[in-house]
Amino acid sequence: NMAAKVGHSMGLKRERDAASVFNNAFSDTYAGADGVGLCSDAHPNGPHTSGDTQDNEGTLALTKENVATVREAMMAFKDDRNNKVGVIPNAIMVPPGLEDEARIIVGSVLDPDTANNAINPQSGRFQVYTWHYLTDSNAWFMLDTALMKQSLYWFDRVAPYIKYQGLIDEVVAEWIAYQRYSYGWTDWRWIYGNNPG
């Protein structure tokens, strides 16, 4: 049982570290290659792009209207040569407290805010990912999962292992556990984070 608990603890550590990319997304303390956080209103542009910065950080609450607003903002992202990137947002990541609202927004065929049988244009556009390791109960993220796979990295340097070492003085059983990994991101254009506060 002790060895199993050590393995469980190793798994929890991996989850917390993976989630830290999102939990620290709004902090410049955890800056990427461009010197700002993953979600920032001040991503510097290259010399060929109009304007000084681009923005993938907001303070909008999770609503149907705000989902549409963020989707449009993401689809306007440009590269360092002022070309549209071709972002296609297809997922929303939320903490457990926002899951029901997210599923209503993206799962209702008819507009959930009216009784007039108007269509809900967000229906079927997004997958909903709920991650209980997200620590902010109000923050939510819109993702382009294809770009995410190109820009968000996890490297298992040494795969997790647990090894029985034997008995110490024929009384105490000794186990060792070890893992080594690194993680992070390169480009930021696969995500738009909202932290309403």
Image: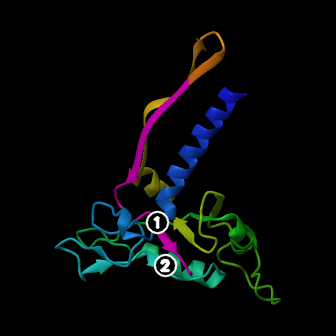
113 part of magenta stretch? no
Q: Residue 28, how many percent across, how many down?
A: 36, 69
Q: Residue at x 61, y 57 (%)?
A: 133
Quick one: label 2, few (<14), some, or many (20+) residues within 10 Å? some
Q: Give the residue drawn at x 29%, y 79%.
A: 53
Q: Which residues are magenta?
A: 176-197
Q: Is residue 121 left or right of residue 162?
A: right
Instruction: From the top left corner, tell me how far across and down residue 140 is, in percent.
Output: 58, 70
The C terminus lies in which quarter of the figure? bottom right
SS under mark 1: strand
Q: Position of residue 1 (x, y in %)?
A: 73, 28
User: Does the magenta segment cover residue 195?
Assistant: yes
- Residue at the spot 56% in from the left edge and 63% down from the top edge: 90
Mark 1 burial class by Cα count in 10 Å: few <14, some 14-19, many 20+: many
Q: Quadrant of residue 161?
A: top right
Residue receiving disc 1: 191
Identify the main secondary structure in magenta: strand
